[in-house]
Image: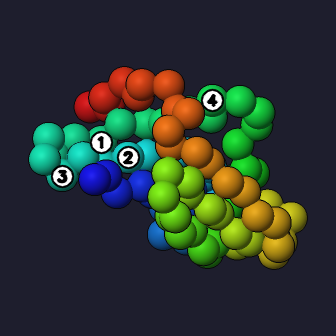
Amino acid sequence: GKLLVFGGRAGVEMGEAALNDLWAFDPEAESWSRLDAAAGAPPSPRSYHAAAAAGDTLYVFGGCGADGRLADMHAFCVRRQPRPSPSS
C-alpha cells in the first residue's frame, strides 16, 4: 500500500501559498512519487481540508483556499492514474 498526501501549505505561516499537488509515498521503497490528474483539472490549492481513501479513490473535501473557506468535494481514482515518476 501507499500513503497519499494532497495539498497543504508551502510553509508554516498562513500567508504562504496553498498547494494542490498529490504525492504517493511507498514505504517499501522509501520513496515519494508525484501523481498528476489523469483527466480534468485538479482541485484548487488548499490547506486544512479533509481527505479519505476508499478502495482506489481518494476523496478531498473543503479546506481553506485563496478566497476563503471551501465546501467542495473531489475524487481522485488512483487506479486510472498514469505511472508516476519518482521524485528526488
Q: Position of residue 86 (x, y in %)?
A: 31, 29
What residue is pinned by disc 1?
32
Q: Residue most toward the front?
A: 55
Q: Residue most toward the right?
A: 67
Tell me what residue is drawn at x 62 percent, y 62 percent.
59
Q: Amino acid at mark 2?
A: Ala
Q: Return the disc, 3 or 1, that comes first in the chain's sequence.
A: 3
Q: Return the disc, 4 or 2, that comes first in the chain's sequence.
A: 2
In this image, 83 relative to 32: left or right? Answer: right
Q: Return the disc, 4 or 1, that comes first in the chain's sequence.
A: 1
- Cα gap from disc 4 to disc 1, whole angstroms: 18 Å
Q: Position of residue 7 (x, y in %)?
A: 56, 56
Quick check: marks 4 and 1 in contact, CB under 8 Å? no
* Circle number at residue 27: 3
Residue at disc 4, secondary structure: loop
Task: Judge whether 76 appears above or below 51 on screen.
Answer: above
Q: Position of residue 14 (x, y in %)?
A: 62, 72
Quick check: marks 3 and 1 in contact, CB under 8 Å? no
